[in-house]
Amino acid sequence: MHTTHMTHSTAKRTLRAELLAARRERPEAARGADSAHIIAALTAGLSHLGVRTVAGYAPIGSEPGQPLPDALLAAGFRVLLPVVRADNDLDWANYRAPTDLAAAGRGLVEPVGRRLGVDAVAGVGAVVVPAVAVGRDGGRLGRGGGSYDRSLPRVPAGVPIVALTYDNELMDVVPTEPHDQRITAVVTPSGGWLTLPAATAEPRSG
Ligand SMILES: Nc1nc2c(c(=O)[nH]1)N(C=O)[C@@H](CNc1ccc(C(=O)N[C@@H](CCC(=O)O)C(=O)O)cc1)CN2
Ligand SMILES: Nc1ncnc2c1ncn2[C@@H]1O[C@H](COP(=O)(O)OP(=O)(O)OP(=O)(O)O)[C@@H](O)[C@H]1O
């Protein structure tokens, strides 16, 4: 890897810190109402597309979309959840019941069952990803670990990559770097499911 790609982007760090602080400042009831709208639009959109297996995640803290894993199960989807590896890449495990989850590092909640391998994400019908902000061009600002930038290139073109954000986190453009993987749709509380035309027009991992 070129060292220039390892330079931390100041623009990303600044925006990430601002938006995470704004999330924490909102009342929990407001976040919960937003998450209910997000979950409803997400499950309707995935059903509409005929998706059967979803690679999701377990929202933590003030992240939008709680309680995503149980909502996906209740809507009838087969659910995979990520397990962060030591190298920050993502392994995957089945999620079938709340007892499948346990506290992990960095405030995360992860599945405890058998790991399916990093390539399990290649076989799902849609990937639901966490984001701190999303650009209308498909850019995604994440937590800064680069986990999804490592994992998403394994997903075949045409499989929806759907980010969940609060309304104020959908922007015209977010700061990106060459390694950043594009998303193809975003779900917000007020806007519902929004397919991103710029992102679907080109291959994601170009
Ligand atoms: N819910 C969730 N799961 C996820 C991600 C995510 O963003 N959200 N990830 C996305 O790649 C991966 C894990 N990467 C992460 C990287 C950094 C932090 C982090 O900064 N945690 C804070 C505490 C967060 C909180 O309590 O709100 C910390 O360590 O201080 C979390 C996850 C895979 N699983
Ligand atoms: N495919 C890759 N292989 C190795 N390192 C990578 C890869 N993609 C990104 N990285 C590294 O990961 C670090 C974080 O990247 P970035 O800030 O884009 O993360 P993010 O997308 O916000 O995080 P996350 O996906 O975990 O939410 C960067 O230092 C970057 O160089």
Image: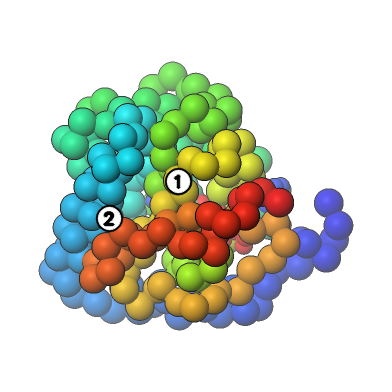
Taking the spot 50% from the left edge, 70% from the top edge, the residue there is 135
Instruction: Identify the image quadrant of residue 111.
Output: top left
Instruction: Identify the image quadrant of residue 188.
Output: bottom left
**Label 1: which residue?**
160
Q: Is residue 58 shown left or right of residue 149?
A: left
- Rendering coords of residue 205 (x, y %): 66, 49
Would you place residue 68 above or below residue 171 in this image?
A: above
Taking the spot 83% from the left edge, 65% from the top edge, the residue there is 4
Amino acid type at image mark 1:
Pro
Give 150 or 126, whichever is nearer the viewer: 126
- Rendering coords of residue 16 (x, y %): 50, 73
Query: For the residues marked 1 and 2, what is the alpha-carbon distance in whole angstroms?
Result: 17 Å
- Rendering coords of residue 12 (x, y %): 59, 73
Amino acid type at image mark 2:
Gly
Give 132 or 157, whichever is nearer the viewer: 157
**What element does badge 2 sit on?**
loop
Taking the spot 38% from the left edge, 42% from the top edge, the residue there is 56
Q: Is mark 2 within 8 Å of ligand 1?
A: no
Q: Residues within 10 Å of mark 1 (few under 14, many from 20)?
A: many
- Rendering coords of residue 81 (x, y %): 40, 36
Q: Is residue 69 shown left or right of residue 57?
A: left
**What element does badge 1 sit on?**
loop
Q: Which is more N-terminal, label 2 or label 1?
A: 2
**Label 2: which residue?**
65
Residue 90's mark? none
Q: Is residue 64 visible?
A: no
Q: Is residue 37 visible?
A: yes
Would you place residue 156 above or below residue 135 in this image?
A: above
Q: Is residue 41 shown left or right of residue 206?
A: left
The reply to whether the C-beta atoms of the residues labelled 1 and 2 are less than 8 Å apart is: no
Name the outermost residue toward the right: 2
Q: Residues within 10 Å of mark 2 (few under 14, many from 20)?
A: many
